[in-house]
Image: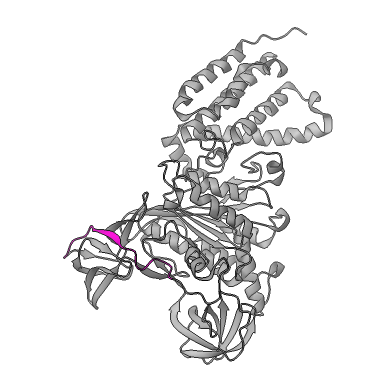
Amino acid sequence: MSGTIDRISGPVVTAIGLTNAKMYDVVKVGRQGLIGEIIKLDAGMAIIQVYEDTTGLRPGEPVENTGNQLSVILGPGLLGSIFDGIQRPLDKIKEVSGDFIARGVNVDSLDRKKKWDFEAIAKKGKNVKGGEIIGEVEETSLIRHRVMVPPEVEGVIDKISDGSFTIEDTVAIIKTKDGNVEVKLAQRWPVRIARPVVSKLPPNIPLITGQRVLDTLFPVAKGGTAAVPGPFGSGKTVIQHQLAKWSDSEIVVYVGCGERGNEMTEILKTFPELKDPKSGKPIMDRTILIANTSNMPVAAREASIYTGITLAEYYRDMGYNVALMADSTSRWAEALREISGRLEEMPGEEGYPAYLGRKVAEFYERTGRVNVLSGSVGSVTAIGAVSPPGGDTSEPVSQNTLRVTRVFWALDASLANSRHFPSINWLNSYSLYIEDLRKWYEDNVNKEWSELYTKTMEILQKEAEINEIVQLVGYDALPEKEKMVLDIAKVIREDFLQQSAFDEVDTYSSMNKQYMMIKSIMLLYEKERDAVERGVSVDQMQGTSAKQKIARMKFTREEQIQKYFDDVKSAIDEIGKIQVQAK
């Protein structure tokens, strides 16, 4: 099972003499036992990508094959943790090696000594199958960890009991046709293999984020996929923070893949301080952070995405709704490109490997709202940030991502520079879930929701067309009808789409509040349109209180919104009383 190093090229090491080597086997490279993974087998040679810095390695040093695939340990203790790309806890690494990750450091992913109070749900003699929940552990103040039968196991429970157990203690024994199987609190799973499900469900329930531009104009379904491309400084990280804090998912997995160290440090500092708005408890009680900065080994960056999606699938199998934030998949693709170059593979467009599209698709295909093995329903929603060089979304990573994701939130640096947040360009963005979610919105928010959405998008698109004319002839040359459209579009942009993440009221809008806000703007549109047809000028309507009230609506608390909405309607009705001025 052991061989020797024959050649070294950055993070890629060629070993000879490895008997019984298989693709994706984990190996220990060199005298320090650096962790690596076999990615290619060729004529008796094993090509290995090493997840640690290979400086100082020499040909002739030993390579040991563990015989196992790159796997993560799944069990209580995951929530609230901060891991690197291959599930090594950074706080434990710091205790061992200080502020910098030492090579060859080996620490347990989960605490093997901590005891958890296990409450059995299933009873002795019960027939159980893979994925079935047999007990629970209170993992954090927000989440109960559901202990499941390993997916491939089926049989009769021979022994199970309540008590305090470590993750390595046996909590149940299942008698199968091949013998007894011990079920522990933790189990292993290979990161490159999707966890099994019964069936996928249609994406007809939205992920409510509380961000008006997303929920109203460009919604993502639970179990859906979204791409957030944008240049540096356009607000990708702010949006992902808001989604992590406010979306109606129970679990958040945040993967910082190849981001700058200072940006990742900010996330690692701010997330533990955030409070869950619904419960007031720390948001880390339902969050897992995976940090792999740009100065960490490139191969571990490639693995971090798979580590994150596997942890997300595990909690999905318990019946939870999980939101996976990947920031950013461009850095992951760059890691693929570097390793591909080291392997001397034929490059594709812009040097990326020819299989980039397949890798991107394989990642996003592991999402979905599904019937899980336990009989309940869970979901993994993936929101991937893309960092195209110079904001050019025609480059390969953005294009391959857009082919497989169904929501495109186009961040715009010019909007961010003008302090318009979220800086999502409403003309370039789209959601292909609109039709799937239409019935949910009409049944759970209001029957006229679809009509309001259509009118809003028409006005914003009409504004863009009129602005082109304004550049040619000037604003004063426009007819009053088109001036009125520009007036209403400005209200939509500034009083509805613009939202402050730092205002305690405006940071989140319920679907009911969003409906009342956009309904108020459409009522204003209808009144102004009627007034213009009567001959009233747009200038005459500028002094009315209706617009001022609509502008303050975003800062109105949820419990007061119905009364405020009624006041706004009364103010809008006053526009109908404006008399036409004699010329």
Q: Is 532 a magenta residue?
A: no
Tell me the quadrant of the picture where the C terminus can be found.
top right
Task: Give residue 171's position: percent from left, percent from top.
Answer: 25, 66
Image quarter hosting the N terminus: bottom left
Q: Can residue 220 be seen at all in this image of the molecule?
A: no
Q: Compared with residue 420, is residue 187 higher up or lower down, i.e. above or below?
A: below
Query: Could you say where residue 153 lies in the image, as x and y percent from the top left?
Result: 29, 70
Q: How many marks?
A: 0
Is residue 116 a member of the stretch shown in magenta? yes
Q: Is residue 387 visible?
A: yes
Question: Residue at image x 23%, y 61%?
Answer: 163
Left or right position of 455 against 199 = right
Residue 160 drawn at (x, y percent): 20, 65
Tell me the magenta residue range: 108-124
Q: Nearer the viewer, residue 104 or 319?
A: 104
The residue sitting at 52% across, 87% down in the picture is: 63
Residue drawn at x 23%, y 74% is 176
